[in-house]
Image (cartoon, rainbow, N blue to C red):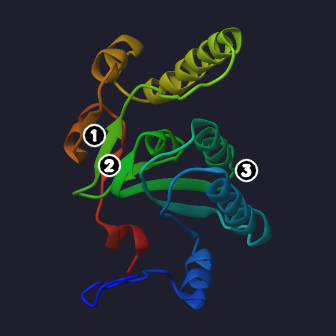
Amino acid sequence: MTGQNDVRVSLTFPEEIQRDLLHRGILVFNEDIDANSLDLFQHHFLYVTQKLGLLRVTVLLTTNGGALDCALGVYDLIAGAPEPCQVDVVANGYCYSAGVIVLQAGKRRLITPNTVLMIHECSTVQFGKMTEVEEDVRFIKRLERRVNEILTKRSKLSLTALSRRTKGKNWWLMPEEALKWQLVDDIVSLSDILRL
């Protein structure tokens, strides 16, 4: 039950706006990264790259992060876009955790002037028999190595430097810092990206 002063606002796009953005090659990813958002993104991504055959796609990314396996699925879709399609990823507002992995998939990795990035070491909660938990921990360490390779591949960060900045803590970056470490390629205004 809500009180008299509670205000609830839904900021969903009307269908015609969503359709218009898709036809312009603009995919809005504004949610946690999980199996549902991966599924929806796959459908939209394949629609614009395969059905519409667009050669330029922009992913507008705002996320708290989420599941690493799903983030790697989104990463693979974007990074594996068929030639000559160019997919740019634009971090807008906030792009945390697994979202920074997705950002790295873009041909151009862009960030708006007041967006915040956050990177941290992998985290998990495990239950079960001791041998199962130990096996899961070994896998998480392998997964973290894969993620760190993605984050350092195009940046100025070494694996050691990344580990030093993220071990046991969150590493927050403003756009200028992300650009300095080459985690992004440019700081851009949203109006330039959306060609308004």
Of helix, strand and loop, which one carries label 3?
Answer: loop
User: Residue tagged by mark 1?
Assistant: 179
Name which residue type carries label 3: Pro
Residue depicted at x 49% and y 80%: 12
Front position in the image: 114 or 171:
171
Query: Which label number is shown at residue 102?
Result: none
Q: Residues within 10 Å of mark 3 (few under 14, many from 20)?
A: some
Q: From this viewpoint, which residue is outermost toward the right?
A: 51
Of helix, strand and loop, which one carries label 1?
Answer: helix
Horizontal side of 132 relative to 176 (left or right) equals right
Label 2 and label 3: CA atoms lie apart by 24 Å
Task: Look at the image and tell me in which quarter the C terminus lies.
Answer: bottom left
Relative to 85, say whether 153 is above or below.
above
Horizontal side of 20 relative to 165 (left or right) equals right
Q: Position of residue 31 (x, y in %)?
A: 50, 60
User: Residue tagged by mark 3?
Assistant: 82
Of helix, strand and loop, which one carries label 2?
Answer: strand
Q: Position of residue 124 (x, y in %)?
A: 52, 29
Label 3 and label 1: CA atoms lie apart by 27 Å
Q: Is tag 2's residue or tag 1's residue first in the polypeptide sequence?
A: 1
Residue depicted at x 67% and y 21%: 128
Name which residue type carries label 2: Asp
Corner quadrant of residue 112: bottom left
Q: Position of residue 139 (x, y in %)?
A: 64, 17
User: Residue tagged by mark 2?
Assistant: 186
Corner quadrant of residue 146: top right
Corner quadrant of residue 61: bottom left
Relative to 128, say whether 88 is above or below.
below
Q: Is tag 2's residue or tag 3's residue first in the polypeptide sequence?
A: 3
Label 2 and label 1: CA atoms lie apart by 7 Å
Assess whether mark 1 and mark 2 are in contact (beta carbons under 8 angstroms).
yes
Name which residue type carries label 1: Leu
